[in-house]
Structures are given as C-alpha cells and as structure tokens.
Amino acid sequence: MNRFEGPGSREAKIRYLDGDFQVLSPGAYVLCAVTSEKIPLDELRYWSVARQEPYVDALTSFNRELQENPELRQRSKV
C-alpha cells in the first residue's frame, strides 16, 4: 500500500498563508496547480498566497509566476 491509499488518503483543503498554511479539511495530500501531481502535506513547500495554489517544486512555482506575470521576464533582461 502506498502513502496515498487507505482511509486517510483524500485530498486536503488548504488555506495558504505567508510562510505557513492552514488545513481546512484534513487529507494526505494536495494537487499541484500546474502538474496535478500529488504533494504529501509533509512535503508541501511551495505555494502562492495570492492565487491560493500549491506547487510541486520551486521551478514549477517560478514558471507559474512568470506565466501569470510576464512583465517579470523583462526585469531579468538587464
């Protein structure tokens, strides 16, 4: 049995805060907003407070930010 099987293996509902998150509805994981990969709550490190979205890793979070704010690409071309 893997970590997402069994009675407690449902998706959690989360409120994303600055530097923390609040569990609104218990579960074992959340789904990445970009890739739909399951992220175990104990491995959740990246999210957007503004969009209330979790991300599987830093690169996915960064790319989503660039997608939502294309003007940020111009800042890096100095």
Image (spheres, helix red, strand yellow):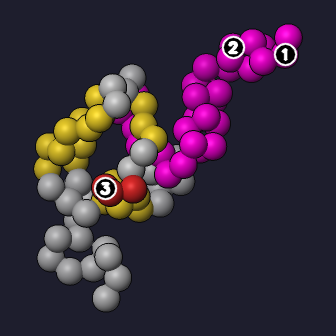
> In the displayed structure, does residue 4 sit left or right of residue 10?
right
Please give the name of the residue rendered at 61% of the width and 34% of the height, measured from the top-left corner.
Answer: 62
For label 3, the residue is 41
> In the displayed structure, does residue 6 sit left or right of residue 4?
left
> In the displayed structure, does residue 22 sit left or right of residue 60?
left
Q: What residue type is labelled 2?
A: Glu
- Marks 2, 1: nearer the viewer: 1
Compared with residue 14, is residue 36 higher up or lower down, i.e. above or below? below
For label 1, the residue is 77
Q: In which quarter of the image is residue 38?
A: bottom left
Spot occupied by residue 39 in the image (x, y as percentages of width and height): 40, 58
Q: Around disc 3, counting alpha carbons within 10 Å, would you say few (fewer than 14), some (14 to 19), or many (20 or more)?
A: some
Please give the name of the residue rendered at 26% of the width and 38% of the height, measured from the top-left corner.
Answer: 21
Q: In the rendering, which numbered label is found on residue 71?
A: 2
Label 3: state its secondary structure. helix
Comparing 1 with 11, the one in front is 1
Contact, CB < 8 Å: mark 1 with mark 3? Answer: no
